[in-house]
Image (cartoon, rainbow, N blue to C red):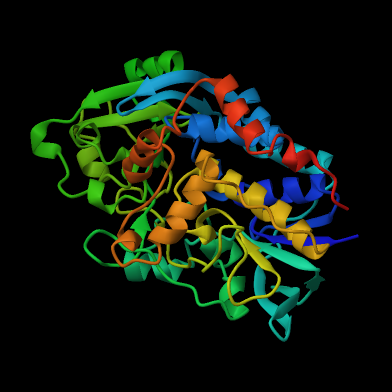
Amino acid sequence: MAKVVIIGGGWAGSGAALSAAKAGANVILLERTDMLLGTGLVGGIMRNNGRFPATEEAIAMGGNEIFEAVDAVARHKNIDFPGHKHATLYDVAKIEPAIKKVLLDAGVEIKLEARAKDVEMDGDKITGIVLQDGQVVKGDVFVETTGTAGPTGNCSKYGNGCAMCVLRCPTFGGRVSMGAKAGAKEFMGKKGDGTFGAMSGSCKLHKESLSKDIEQELNETGVCVVPIPEKLRKKDALSKKACQQYALKEFAENVILLDTGHAKLMSPFYPLETLRQIPGFENARYEDPYSGGIGNSMRYLALSPRNNELKVEGVNNLFCGGEKAGLLVGHTEAIVTGLLAGCNAVRFAIGEELLTIPAELAIGDAIAYVGDQMTTEEGLKFKYTFSGSVYFERMQKEDLYTTDVNEIKDRVEKAGLTGIYNKKLV
């Protein structure tokens, strides 16, 4: 039986583990911390704008279990907030156990607190992943989904210092790139001004620390928009965000909150003293990152060179998903690239032709388009997502954006990919 080792248990790693297991492989998932999902533990937004058709494409292809788990723990469905429509907000306190169950039910072996620190090689092939405790996890093919944030030094070098975020590098040790260890020539994304990286796009506030009116509105509607007095508005904050789909005028002039269990503050950081001057926020307290008054995690500092099948260039048996696969922003983006990477890892292990998702589908178009853009100096300055900014504009132009589920299913059927992730390969 083919053995697939997934390094990194975020959304992309979870998607890769699921598709590889459904294909019949022996799958082991290595996660550095004591919980799965990484930034998904504080994210919470799904299906907004172009993420809707991307989600339905993945479901039609057979990646439904993850999205069904998300829907089962949703706090709000089909809500609108500035610049975004038909969003689902999941409960960040309930999502991790739900996804863990999906993976265990699929037969995935999950190893928590298993920090990967090095690789064992045979020529240009990885033969094993060396863990912090010295154990070596052997495999036939590997999928790296370690993300691009951390270790702590990167947040200090490219951002405002460690903000004590959900990635918890000081506790569990920083992320180590297996692709780089194996010899892949990684590269870094840039901000619009040419400096490296991008700051995570939102913070969490303790909901009970806000005024009763704000708390009630969040619980009942899922959204609360509070105008910022002009003298307190931050300058240039939007340009720092990884999530450029939220870099809109409304987000500069208002505090926009979403209910994901906590109050999700749609800003990469907000000085606490300033925030507490806004009516309703007098007692506000950050939930994650704890130092959200000065910054958030810095991302896009370790991108893997890859093809449209998500095979890493320069390493014989390594695939990638999520942020490792490029300047893609968001949970949905991570899941759908993870699903493809896991499926192709199994195909590679058994000598079967790798799957390429065609550009007639939003997922395939995004993977190819972002791959092309990352080869240009200008393209490295953008962040791409189904939910807004430059890629959502492209989706609309290419007629890839629709909320008609039957139309989406028809597109997947015409591409010959209906249920492709349900196909046993081993």
| Residue closest to the far bottom | 123
Q: Nearer the viewer, residue 229 or 44?
A: 44
Q: Which quarter of the figure is the N terminus placed in?
A: bottom right
Tell me, yes or no, if residue 326 can be seen here. yes
Report x, y in % for residue 293: 30, 48
Q: Is residue 166 left or right of residue 292?
A: right
Report x, y in % for residue 284: 33, 34
Instruction: Say how many tags the image has.
Output: 0
Report x, y in % for residue 349: 80, 64
On the image, which quarter does residue 28 sit in? bottom right
Asked if 217 appears above or below 160 in the picture, the reply is: above
Q: Is residue 178 left or right of residue 328?
A: right
Asked if 199 appears above or below 232 in the picture, the reply is: below
Report x, y in % for residue 184: 56, 77
On the image, which quarter does residue 5 sit in? bottom right
Q: Residue at x 67, y 62 (%)?
A: 143
Q: Residue at x 27, y 43 (%)?
A: 272
Q: Residue at x 38, y 44 (%)?
A: 391
| Residue closest to the far right | 1
Asked if 220 appears above or below 394 in the picture, the reply is: above
| Residue closest to the far front | 414
Q: Residue at x 68, y 75 (%)?
A: 316
Asked if 136 appears above or below 190 in the picture, the reply is: below
Q: Nearer the viewer, residue 387 or 40?
A: 387
Q: Nearer the viewer, residue 367 or 177?
A: 367
Tell me, yes or no, if residue 10 can be seen here. no
On the image, which quarter does residue 132 sit in? bottom right
